[in-house]
Amino acid sequence: MDIIIANKSHGVYADIICNTIEESANIRGTGIARRTPEYILQRMDNGNAVIALDGDQFVGFCYIEKWNHGKFVANSGLIVHPNYRGKGVAKMIKKKIFEHSRAKFPDAKVFSITTGLPVMKMNSELGYKPVTFSELTDDQEFWKGCQTCKNYDVLQRTGQSMCLCTGMLYDPKSESKSKKKIKENVFKRWKSIKQTRFLKKNKNERS
Ligand SMILES: CC(C)(COP(=O)(O)OP(=O)(O)OC[C@H]1O[C@@H](n2cnc3c(N)ncnc32)[C@H](O)[C@@H]1OP(=O)(O)O)[C@@H](O)C(=O)NCCC(=O)NCCS
């Protein structure tokens, strides 16, 4: 298996990447920031994406987005093909894209918003900390990505201050680089409190 910085030559995988992201979101019943193959291609062209391949088979993907003119970067769109899950591939992709982000944008704060336990676990191990949304980018282009999420009304109702997603941030200037593991039972309790508080009665769970 190869986990590499994607380039123009990987454009042939843009369709399967978009389809796999969309199908996985549909199966989980989650909202996502929808991306087109053109958008994915642009990230590859700029050297702002990581792709995992098994020979010429698509295995996984993740890309970097720059916000507030490079003050923040997000590692987004993490996807592992269903045939390759549970083997540590996401962990390797996250590590590679995090190291690439740090090397390419050394002064940028790296952040992510997610409802998913696997992503929270991986972020914590890389040194991210949970933060309020006020600590994240105020670049409205980023938050526009939430418009395609089925919980967008929650974000609107709270004036963009909170939602079902948890914000996580790696601050390169932060003194403390202690990496704490997320406790699964604590995470589940926290998620359940948020859902009870924010979701209307007939709304499905996000992830
Ligand atoms: C989430 C996803 C990327 C994980 O990929 P993966 O290659 O199976 O993950 P890994 O095997 O590298 O596991 C990474 C960590 O997450 C944990 N994990 C993986 N799937 C999990 C699940 N369904 N529930 C709880 N923990 C899970 C693993 O146990 C591991 O943690 P550990 O090191 O403490 O054991 C993959 O399931 C996927 O593509 N899902 C659909 C898209 C998605 O949800 N993307 C994230 C958007 S925020």
Image: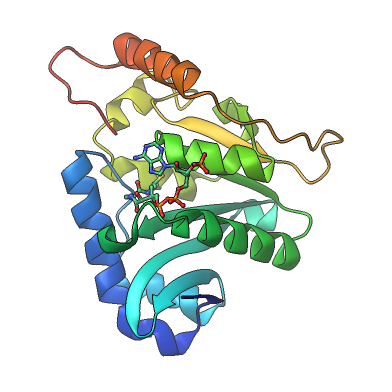
Please state, as top left, top right, bottom left or bottom right, where the C terminus lies in the image.
top left
Q: Is residue 115 above or below residue 45?
A: above
User: What colouring method underlies this structural image?
Assistant: rainbow
Task: Pick out the residue farthest to the right.
Answer: 175
Query: In x, y percent, where is residue 4?
Result: 54, 76
Q: Tell me if residue 62 comes above or below residue 3 in the rendering.
A: above
Residue 83, position in %: x, y?
A: 26, 62
Q: Residue at x 83, y 33 (%)?
A: 176
The structure residue drawn at horizontal position 65% and vertical position 39%, both measured from the top left corner, is 128
- 86 or 21, which lies in front? 86
- Outermost residue to the left: 202
Measuring from the top left, give residue 113's x and y in whole percent: 48, 38
Outermost residue, bottom direction?
Answer: 9
Residue 177, position in %: x, y? 79, 38
Residue in the picture at 36% in, 59% down? 80
Question: Is residue 137 visible in the rendered structure shown here?
Answer: no
Kindly tell me whether residue 38 is visible in this rendering.
Answer: yes
Callout count:
0
Q: Is residue 194 above or below residue 63?
A: above
